[in-house]
Amino acid sequence: MRDLPINADRLAASLDELGTIGRDHRDGSINRICVTPVERQAHDMMATWMTAVGLRVTRDAFGNTIGTRPGRGAGGSIAIGSHLDSVPRGGNYDGAAGVVGALEVVRALDDADVRTEHDLTLVCFSAEEGARFGKPCLGSKAAVEGLGDDELALSDRDGVSLRDALAAVGMRPLETTRPAPWTRDVAAFLELHIEQGRVLQEAGEDVGVVDCIAGNRRLRMRLRGQTDHSGATPMRLRRDALVAAAEVVVAVHRLVRRAEDLVGTVGELTVHPGAMTAVPGRVDLGVDVRGTDARVQERTIQQVIEAARAACRDHDVELEVDDVSDVPPVELSPWLRDVVAGAARRVTGRARVLTSGAGHDAGVTARRIPTSVIFIPCRDGVSHSPAEWAAPEHLATGTQVLAQAVLDVDAQATTAAAVRSREQS
Ligand SMILES: [Zn+2]
């Protein structure tokens, strides 16, 4: 069969139009914070477009928008899509590129008059970004596994709980504790997304296939020494929390660099009282370590804690450590990865396989559904910023690979059950 006729101009135009929702004209940033009326406007725009191309559009209890294009009747459906929410002052590509790319696949199938064997399900997830409630991928978690009461009780900085926020935008929080019925028959989920890193750009690749989504371990540390006058306190009497904290920062960097495929950051450091003339009595800091090997990730975080204890002992500083997050890396479906790599080779002649340092809805769906992620480069790896940008030709190429992968999965998978048994063999 010939390639599906992906229309790069139509794709770019839809992305631009979607980008009018939540745009702040002062800096061009996108502000579609999850579970707000603004995010709902984006879902409504997508629902209108999906209805216009003949999809059967529904909304699950959390507010994920789903459109179905019926197939010839093979069991199971192939789901494609991404998320519609953004971080505060975000860009127009993170999430949106994958949603609009999925819509373009449907339009191209219509243009080519192709009917798939399986149902095709276009998914617009809500609440992928953790910026508001502190936890990412709440929409996809609700859909595929159901939320816990602890998750519904999460609150934003104004004290509004997720449960109340969902009700306020017309959703049904009580039903989000059970998986959404639409996920039951999904045989495969394919997500197109910008890389949010520089690997593809530096390698000169147009597209990449993700084999693993990195996990993360996050700690919050409180170092308590003693605040003293910076002039009147002799050096030997000091309990300087910032000096100990500085050793922790360096230890994170050193330990992470020693391990393979690991990144680590201290991106948060609050110094009390924060005066030039005071010995810092307290420092709060946040450690973020991410890797693709769960054992290496855990071993390194334990080494970080040991190094912090040693530094605090040396400076007579007390240390408190809180676990903030413990997300294991997720290996994506090897079978789907190979199918998508085949599609990438057909479209571009190559198939670069890489890991994802950032988390995605795909990392959640992969726990229940064979899942794959297609990356396109974004300029200088910049994301979560109004400067986020991907070349229209890369977006079109990624969408072409997504379209080809849909056809290939459709040809290879007979039913959801067959895919899942293939995964297990
Ligand atoms: Zn995203």
Image (cartoon, rainbow, N blue to C red):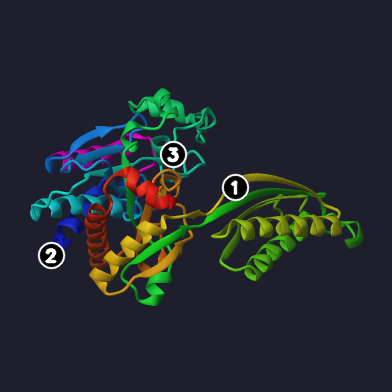
Q: Secondary structure at mark 3?
A: helix
Q: CA distance from mark 2 to mark 1?
A: 45 Å
Q: Are marks 3 and 1 in contact (CB under 8 Å)?
A: no
**In this picture, which residue range is highlighted in magenta?**
32-51
Disc 2 target residue: 2
**Residue for point 40% across, 41% down:** 140
Q: Quadrant of residue 341?
A: bottom left
Q: Residue 359, image x and y in percent?
A: 46, 52
x and y percentages locating residue 272 in the rendered image: 71, 49
Which of the marked residues, 2 or 1, is nearer the chain's N terminus?
2
385 left or right of 295? left
Residue placed at 24% from the left, 48% from the top? 18
Of labels 3 and 1, earlier in sequence is 3
Hey, what amino acid is under mark 1? Asp
Can see residue 152?
Answer: yes
Give the residue number, with chain letter if any, for mark 3: 141
At x 41%, y 29%, the residue is 176
Q: Nearer the viewer, residue 6 or 266?
A: 6
Res. 194 visible in picture: no
On residue 369, the disc is none
Q: Earlier in the sequence, mark 2 or mark 3?
A: 2
* Label 1 C-beta lies within 8 Å of the nearest ligand 1 atom: no
- List the residue tagged with mark 1: 326
Judge left or right: residue 130 versus residue 238.
left
Q: Locate the N terminus and report the quarter of the image it occupies.
A: bottom left
Under mark 2, the amino acid is Arg
- Which structural element holds mark 2? loop
